[in-house]
Image (cartoon, rainbow, N blue to C red):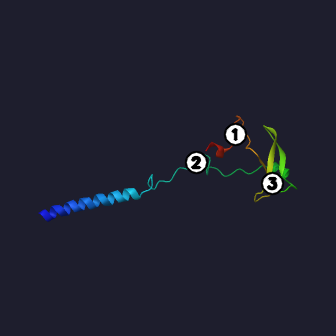
Amino acid sequence: MKNLLNLARASIFMAALGASLFVHAQPPGGDQKRPPEAGKDDRPPREPPPQAYEDCKGKKEGAVVQITTPREGKISATCTNSPKGLFAKPERPPRTPEGKENNPQAKK
């Protein structure tokens, strides 16, 4: 009877030890993945407008050009390489019609 009681205690101890090791081996949040950040992966990246490629025709990568935007008039842009060729990338993102900056990376 004494051996049976010792065996029961040892079994409970081993089960508790095993459970605690399993719990500590899990990363915070278990195996759940984080939800994607807002604005990422929910739509493909926007293509530059055709005029952005025209503005850098005959220029070299890194050249600074002036571009005209519908809402802000003339702003500086840098000729940037892409798979489709050089395009004028504004030094700051264009604003939305409400006047807010259209830059999802700035919201981090």
Element carrying mark 1: loop
Circle number at residue 62: 3
Give percent across and percent down for residue 104: 65, 45
Circle number at residue 59: none
In primary-sequence order, the first of circles 1 and 3 is 3
Kind of residue sitting beneath label 2: Glu
In primary-sequence order, the first of circles 2 and 1 is 2
Element carrying mark 3: loop
Residue at the far left in the pictured view: 1
The residue under the point 37% across, 56% down is 23
Q: Within 10 Å of the Cα at label 1, are there few (<14), some (14-19), or many (20+) other Cα atoms?
A: some
In this rendering, the label closer to the viewer, 3 or 2: 3
In primary-sequence order, the first of circles 3 and 2 is 2
Give percent across and percent down for residue 31: 45, 56
Question: Residue 30's image quarter?
Answer: bottom left
In this rendering, the label closer to the viewer, 1 or 3: 3
Classify residue 73 as left or right of residue 24: right
Image quarter (top left, top right, bottom left or bottom right) of the N terminus? bottom left
- Count all numbered tags in the image, as a single digit: 3
Disc 1 to disc 3, C-alpha distance: 23 Å
Question: Residue 19's image quarter?
Answer: bottom left
User: Which residue has dot 2 on it?
Assistant: 37
Circle number at residue 101: 1
The residue under the point 32% across, 61% down is 18
Kind of residue sitting beneath label 1: Glu
Kind of residue sitting beneath label 3: Gly
Element carrying mark 2: loop
Q: Do labels 1 and 3 touch, CB within 8 Å? A: no
